[in-house]
Amino acid sequence: MVKLTINGRQIEAKEKTTVLEVTKELGINIPTLCHDDRLSKETSCRLCVVEVNGGEKLLTSCNLEVAEGMAIETHSDKVIEARKHNLSLLWGPHPNECVVCEKSGECKLEEYNYEYDIDVEPIFDAHKRNQPKNESNHFFEIDPRKCILCGKCIRMCDEQMQVGALGYVNRGNETFVTFANEDFDEANCVSCGNCVSVCPTGALMPKSKSKYRNWNTTRTKTTCPYCGVGCQMELVVTNGEVVRVEPVVDAVNNGLLCVKGKFAFNFINHPNRLKTPLIKRNGVFEEATWDEAYSLIKDKVDLIKKDYPNSFAGLSSARCTNEENYLFQKMMRAVFGTNNVDHCARLCHASTVAGLGSTLGSGAMTNSISEVLDHDVIFIAGSNTTSTHPVIGSFMKQAQARGAKVIVAEPREIELAENADVFIQIQPGSNVALFKGMMHYIYKNDLQDEEFIRLRTEGFEEFIKSIEDFTTEEAAQICGCKKEDIEKAAEIYAKGKRAGIYYSMGVTQHSQGTNGVKSVANLAMLCGHVGKESSGINPLRGQNNVQGACDLGALPNNFTGYQKVFDDLARAKFESAWGVKLDSQVGLTVPKIIDGMVNDEIKFLYIMGENPMISDPDINHVKHGLESVDFLVVQDIFLTETAEFADVVLPASSYAEKTGTFTNTERKIQLVNKVIEPTGNSKPDWIILKELMTELGYPQAYSSPSDIMDEIASLTPIYGGVNYDRVSKSGLQWPCFDESHPGTKYLHKDKFSRGKGLFTPVEYISPMEVADDEYPITLTTGRTLYHYHTATMTNKTEGINKIVPENFFEISKETAKKYNLINGAKTYVSSRRGTTIAVVKVVDTIKDDVIFMPFHFANGANVLTNTALDQFCDIPELKVCAVKFDDKL
Amino acid sequence: MPNKIKVNLNSSHFQELDSFIDGLETTEGELISILHKAQSIFGYLPKEVQIHIAKRVNVPVSRVYGVVSFYSYFTMKPKGKYHISVCTGTACFVRGADAVLRDFEEELEIKSGETTKDGLFSLDSLRCVGACALAPVVLINEDVYGKEDAKKVKEIIQKYMKINSEG
């Protein structure tokens, strides 16, 4: 600690802290324009100058470290005079048009000009930057005239995003900020808009359709509704309309957002939102009242229950809140009397829940997102992180810039592969072989962590036999890569001190998905890279609340907190709490529910916030099922492709219109706050479920989602200490057993959830459908940065549709040539299950004879995909199937 | 007829640039020398070349663009067969460089920074060539014109048109 004086006041401060930091803590307001705690110090605006020890020269406080005996004056006459002078220099070239500027009210320059009484007439006849606006980006524009050259946007793009799309051009008075070659696309801009969020003036502004004044808006903190990162942000609202999104500097996202979180909010106030219940009569939807809709559902339920009591099923939603998922599975179990409840986690991380559950005892990310920054090795397998979890992708790049080594194993040369230390372009579906090859090399070269294996694990002897003869040559042959790359990857990973594996659908969506996940667990345990800070196994969860939907029991074998329906003690607890007898039989999974509809075993299906007509494999099969089922209820915010098949459609409120919690990929339960009133007659899902359960003769009396969370906590050990008071502060990571438990930053410290970590022998088995003479191309699927899943929410934003307007597939130059496919033209792509049409996109990032198609579009990729299932968890093999091209049908 | 300047972005030029880059001990801190080399190979620095260099040197394209736009020596447009640089440094400016530049613009019907349609002349201004005693100074490729000679804009242009037509 050092002692110093600030404005005559004696204080103590930590060494190495800056004067600006210290004054901020003291509540002294020093103006800054170019400073941001997260960015390097540019010291260009010179507004933060202070007087030091009465010296002649004023120093910038943002980079001035405290020292013993220092005497600081933050607001002396001399300082104020200097600030006025510097502000005048910045104001000189700036256009005097604050009255019509959208930034007005939140502009820092405007604020300080007012605070420091700057003359409106510039005292300097300054050079004006007269470059026109750069409007090349679809979401925001750059107005160089309003730029004060603070460089925050450039540093944000360079240091935090690691993209470098923005830079200064020209020199002297002509200098301004723009994209390389003036075009956002050529500059590799990812449209995250974080530059816009840090701009202190109106130079970088969203292309807003709404006209509003900042002083007529309110801001409410909430959680992003897109991916599993769970970014914290504020919705800016005026007159019941969400007009802007601003990031919150928080432990999760550190004030970063991606293009979806920042700009794709148009869906909230979109005119196509469902506003009233719909009942299908003679094949046509007619508007109905809530009472009509509820009583029709009740009549049908009673009717079907009489003759077919075991024919009910429900699909819950990874897009809805924890409280709503809890109520949904409670309704299915307690009211419909069935465990046939599942949700789309079946399609993404069912193999993780099964594979990590059995080996470690918990199927979740072991580390926290903030720990990404401190890895010294990052191994990314089957995850295009910068597209699917963009903010985590940025953290990975930041870690790399700090010196972390990066290994990427992917069928495509993804963004993170470009600068990776090792990039292994694997054949889709060959993960198990890759992991086994790496483990073989590690074991043969004695790179394993003996002590960890001895103290923390079991099953090693049996396991090692399964890799002893599996050489890197054999692995390389299966993966279609060089054995040296596998060896190099093994060497780097094993020798890491804080190594993290990050994996996603590329590992899980296979008929061997569970084995892929078990192999990941084997690899991490072999090297002792789990159960430590910044060292672990990290399945990146897809949706905003897919972790929560699993946690809250929207699974056919689990009550909340992974308590088994066949466990008599657990069942007795829920029977007593819910006052009904519960089924001990494990229910049907998503694919089996769809089969059940086709086979007429399922006669009633309730879908909340899911769109299987786009997201599930073999769409023709799904369609057949939805057409066959006797009665279909769909509850959603839009009339989705799936809702078109419904007998009753219930209009739900969006995340902005309700309160609840989401659990993000790092197991953090975070608050979702109501920002505007529900659209039309729509209702929050929890209210619909509560009212319907009551209508069905099982009265529910929750007055708020907080009540539901209290009930969850009372029945769920890992959520035991969770309540709204605690969560509202800054979230809480499970396991959190009681109200005094602080939550858990990383899992398996000292002891695995299951006791000892279990090594499992795993055999490599190829995908169920591989390319052959008739279908010579391997199709793999996934997401793009811009659309989210079935695009129901993202396709309401114009800019997104401009960038990714329609179905396409990526193909290598050689393969395109071989099949006479022209870049930009459309072609038919067929598998044994169906045909879709898509635009050819020739790229140099994919292997020959492999294509990649995103699954965002109706009648798109999932018309082609295979329903082959993983034997342990029923996850379909969405990542690999065989296709061919046709120029006509 | 004068030959039109062709945009030469053929692969042999990229190969030549790549072998220069490969010959460097490190690319760190070598961006400017690489850009120099590239401009000597391609004649100018179009965006394709900038993107290529950015990838090779592993810096964002925006950084390359920033450097290219910073130095007046670098150009993103193909230069003419005869490149005219009018010095507008302090000494030259005092001696009427602005009028010389204006005369060239009017005579060639192009603005500073542009190239004539036939690709024969390009024009720009630069700041101080270090020959202030000769102010105002005009550079045409390697030739230097100073003092009163520099002001004979029409004559200078005709001279180079004649040289060109004589081959």
Image: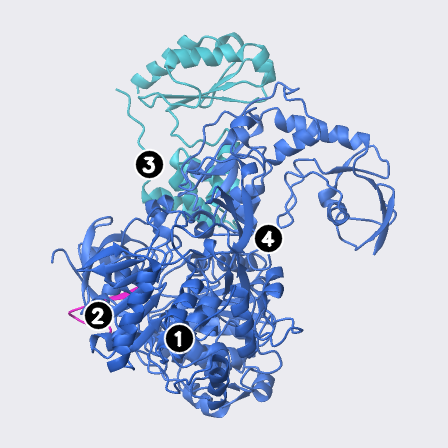
Chain colours: A blue, B cyan
Looking at the image, which residue is at 54% across and 26% down? A99
Q: Main secondary structure of the magenta part?
A: loop
Spot occupied by residue A21 in the image (x, y as percentages of width and height): 73, 48
User: Which segment did they paint magenta?
Assistant: A767-781
User: Where residue B8 is drawn, which disc sits there?
Assistant: 3
Badge 1 density bin: few <14, some 14–19, many ≥20, Cα 10 Å: many
Q: Secondary structure at mark 1?
A: helix
Q: Are marks 3 and 1 on the same chain?
A: no
Distance between mark 2 and mark 1 Cα atoms: 21 Å
The residue pinned by badge 4 equals A249
Spot occupied by residue A299 in the image (x, y as percentages of width and height): 28, 71
Looking at the image, which residue is at 60% across and 85% down? A451
The residue pinned by badge 2 equals A621
The residue pinned by badge 1 equals A350
Which amino acid, by three-letter code, is at mark 1? Answer: Ala
> In this rendering, is residue A399 above or below A351?
above
Distance between mark 3 and mark 2 Cα atoms: 55 Å
Q: Given contact means CB atoms under 8 Å apart, are the residues at marks 3 and 1 in contact?
A: no
Badge 2 density bin: few <14, some 14–19, many ≥20, Cα 10 Å: many
Badge 4 density bin: few <14, some 14–19, many ≥20, Cα 10 Å: some
Q: Is residue B109 visible?
A: yes
Distance between mark 3 and mark 4 Cα atoms: 49 Å
Instruction: Tell which subunit mark 1 falls on.
Output: A
Instruction: Tell which subunit mark 3 falls on.
Output: B
Which amino acid, by three-letter code, is at mark 2? Answer: His
